[in-house]
């Protein structure tokens, strides 16, 4: 009997902690790639989009110059978890060349030698509006958002304004990911072996990077 090794290992990999294929409902009427696309890739993309919107809601309710609320903390933690799920199995760049660089725009961790915390501390002290001050892509990343929210336990009016601006930029990226995945649904299912290879390679690449960063 011939065993399809690639799908087997893909299912095993996606059953690991943080990857949620095991949570899906009965999908016997779908091909493996359709199920993978609908219940992992697209669903996770929609989850990070919703998480960003939830953080926007929490920030809107956050008083200026007041201690950071538990709602903001919870929403930010959910945003990070949701983004990591998307990032780990991100294959959109293989399907749409315009989306290759999107993860690097969202998350600048381990990119270059820029001291982002130092730069953003200077930016916060500049007194410039967010549109003027946050001119670099790295200043509108999820890493920058963490700096604006967690410099200390209090969110100043400036920190909140910068966080709002950065979050809006991130939400545009997340929405673009959702739209692009939706546009590529048929292409993903057209060549099932190639598509599962894309996902497996993304998972291997993510695991390798995690190992290297821990060393």
Image: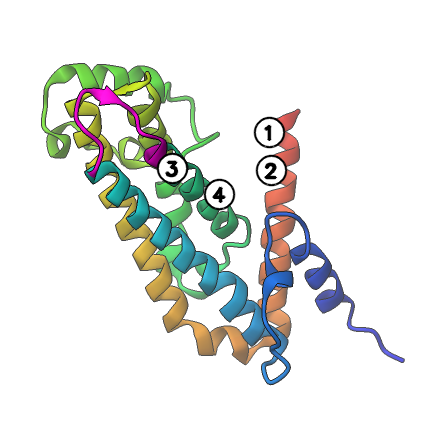
Quadrant of image for the N terminus: bottom right
Q: Earlier in the sequence, mark 3 or mark 1?
A: 3
Q: In the displayed structure, would residue 47 be above or below residue 108?
A: below
**Tag nearer the camera, 3 or 1:** 3
Q: Earlier in the sequence, mark 2 or mark 3?
A: 3
Residue 209's tag is: 2
Residue 24 forms part of the magenta stretch:
no
Mark 1 in CB contact with mark 2 (< 8 angstroms) = yes
Q: Distance of mark 1 from mark 4, alpha carbons?
A: 18 Å
Q: Is residue 147 left or right of residue 207?
A: left
Q: Distance of mark 2 from mark 3, alpha carbons?
A: 23 Å
**Tag nearer the camera, 1 or 4:** 4
Mark 4 in CB contact with mark 2 (< 8 angstroms) = no
Mark 3 in CB contact with mark 1 (< 8 angstroms) = no
Callout 2 crowding tier (Cα within 10 Å): few <14, some 14–19, many ≥20: few
Residue 76's tag is: 3
Residue 81's tag is: 4
Q: Nearer the viewer, residue 55 or 45?
A: 55
> Residue at coordinates 37% horizontally, 72% vertically from top-left?
183
Provide the residue span drawn in magenta.
61-72
Q: Position of residue 208 (x, y in %)?
A: 65, 40
Quadrant of image for the C terminus: top right
Q: Distance of mark 3 from mark 4, alpha carbons?
A: 9 Å
| Badge 4 element | helix
Residue 199's tag is: none
Q: Nearer the viewer, residue 147 or 117?
A: 147
Q: Quadrant of residue 80?
A: top left
Q: Which residue is mark 1?
A: 213
Q: Distance of mark 4 from mark 2, alpha carbons?
A: 17 Å
């Amino acid at each position: 009997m011939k065993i399809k090794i690639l799908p087997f290992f893909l299912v095993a990999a996606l059953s690991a902690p943080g990857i949620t294929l095991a949570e899906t409902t009965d999908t016997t009427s779908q091909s493996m790639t359709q199920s993978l696309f609908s219940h992992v890739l697209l669903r996770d993309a929609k989850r990070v989009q919703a998480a960003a919107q939830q953080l926007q809601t929490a920030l809107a309710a956050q008083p200026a110059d007041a201690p950071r609320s538990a709602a903001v903390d919870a929403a930010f933690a959910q945003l990070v978890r949701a983004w990591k799920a998307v990032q780990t199995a991100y294959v959109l760049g293989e399907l749409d060349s315009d989306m290759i660089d999107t993860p690097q725009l969202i998350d600048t961790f381990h990119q270059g030698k820029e001291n982002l915390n130092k730069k953003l501390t200077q930016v916060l002290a500049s007194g410039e509006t967010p549109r003027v001050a946050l001119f670099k892509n790295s200043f509108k990343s999820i890493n920058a958002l963490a700096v604006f929210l967690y410099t200390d336990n209090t969110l100043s009016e400036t920190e909140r304004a910068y966080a709002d601006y950065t979050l809006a930029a991130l939400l545009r990226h997340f929405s673009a990911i959702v739209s692009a995945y939706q546009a590529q649904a048929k292409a993903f299912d057209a060549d099932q072996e190639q598509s599962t290879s894309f996902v497996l390679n993304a998972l291997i690449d993510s695991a390798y990077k995690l190992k290297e960063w821990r060393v």
